[in-house]
Image (cartoon, helix red, strand yellow):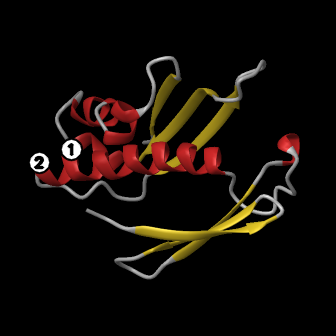
Amino acid sequence: MVKITGTYEGELHCTARHEPSGDTLSTDAPRDNQGRGAAFSPTDLVATAFATCIATTMALMARKHGHELGPLRYEVTKEMTATPPRAIARLAVTLWLPASARAVPAGELERAARGCPVHRSLAPEVVKDIAFVWED
């Protein structure tokens, strides 16, 4: 179990504290939803969690096969529904895998990406696209 505590500070701004590490972060409502866009929005954090969960789960799979994944890069885009109620409609992740990742048996990293806990936790109606770019 992990405890996260926080406060709503007014003007659509929150702070959160990760109790095990003491690390903190802020959120702010996006400009297109009455906010200042001064920090990650809560749904930006979902997109971030999706991409970082994929990267972490792939790294764990690489370790399982005796390899370090190396410097993987990612980009995630988030699209919200066009009509109310407001919700995440689509998350699209592109991953650039280093040549060293080819040491992991074919298909294992892709399978790990699609099986990460955040992927499995998102509502089925959220479109989840993952693209893999294998660098030389």
Q: What amino acid is labelled 1 in the image?
A: Ala
How many marks do you count on the picture? 2
Q: Quadrant of the C terminus?
A: top left
- Residue to which mark 1 is pinned: 103
The answer to whether marks 2 and 1 mark residues whose Cβ atoms lie closer than 8 Å is yes
User: Taking 132 as reference, is 15 left or right?
Assistant: right
Give the farthest residue toward the bottom: 22
**Label 2 environment density (alpha carbons within 10 Å; few <14, some 14–19, many ≥20):** few
The label on residue 82 is: none
Q: Nearer the viewer, residue 100 or 125?
A: 125
**Label 1 environment density (alpha carbons within 10 Å; few <14, some 14–19, many ≥20):** few
Question: Which residue occupies 34% across, 36% down?
Answer: 113
User: Taking 24 as reference, is 87 left or right?
Assistant: right
Question: Which residue occupies 37% across, 34% down?
Answer: 121
Question: Which residue occupies 38% across, 43% down?
Answer: 54
The mark that comes first in sequence, 2 or 1, is 2
**SS under mark 2:** loop
Q: Quadrant of the N terminus?
A: bottom left
Q: What amino acid is labelled 2 in the image?
A: His
Residue 30 pos. (x, y %): 80, 48
Residue 17 pos. (x, y %): 50, 74
User: Taking 43 as reference, is 105 left or right?
Assistant: left
User: Taking 100 as reference, is 10 left or right?
Assistant: right
- Vertical arrangement, residue 1 with respect to residue 65, above or below: below
Question: Which residue occupies 21% across, 29% down?
Answer: 106
- Residue to which mark 2 is pinned: 65
Mark 2 vs mark 1: give the one in front.
2
Q: Nearer the viewer, residue 114 or 45?
A: 45
Residue 124 pos. (x, y %): 44, 19
